[in-house]
Image: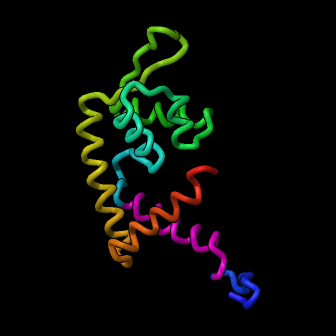
Amino acid sequence: MQKNGEPKRLEDFAGYNLRRASNVVLSDFADMFAGSGVRPTSFSVACVIDEQPGTTSAEICRILGLQRANIVALLAELDALGTIRRVDDENDKRSQRLYLTDRGEVDLAAWRAMAASHETRALSRLSDDEQAQLVDMLRRIWRDA
């Protein structure tokens, strides 16, 4: 950094470092999940459905910051894997409530274990305290944006 606090080199920009770190983490995720049919975003959608059974696609979009147009393909991926089931909302027939299937619960447990292993590997250069600090700092960047 320069004395006035402005980055002088590319490597001094937070955004550059976030993008590089993201590329490493996403590449490792892709390697870990190769052949499973699961991508980072579909994994996130399955986690939300597990953590909030009966949620709607609109609620998932709000929680994950997704565009409504993107959720259709993500749900189709999970549907094709036999991971989710859709139940018409009793009060609003235009909406569907989303739940994991029995297979989805088994698959998600395996995916969570894979994701934990992936994170351990991807963040191995950081101590446990540094990993917790990193997650906290990243969360503060996006949480109320």
Prevailing secondary structure class for the magenta stretch in the rendered image:
helix
Is the N terminus in the top left, top right, bottom left or bottom right quadrant?
A: bottom right
Position of residue 35 measured from the top left corner of the image (x, y, whole percent): 35, 50
Q: Nearer the viewer, residue 140 or 127?
A: 140
Position of residue 95 measured from the top left corner of the image (x, y, whole percent): 52, 17
Position of residue 65 measured from the top left corner of the image (x, y, whole percent): 58, 43
Which residue: 66% across, 76% down? 13
Most distant residue in the bottom direction: 3
Q: Is residue 119 left or right of residue 16?
A: left
Residue 70 image-quadrant placement: top right
Q: Nearer the viewer, residue 108 or 8?
A: 8
Q: Is residue 75 magenta?
A: no
Residue 16 image-quadrant placement: bottom right
Q: Is residue 51 left or right of residue 8?
A: left
7 is higher (above) or lower (below) than 109: below
Residue range in magenta is 12-31
Which residue: 45% across, 50% down? 40
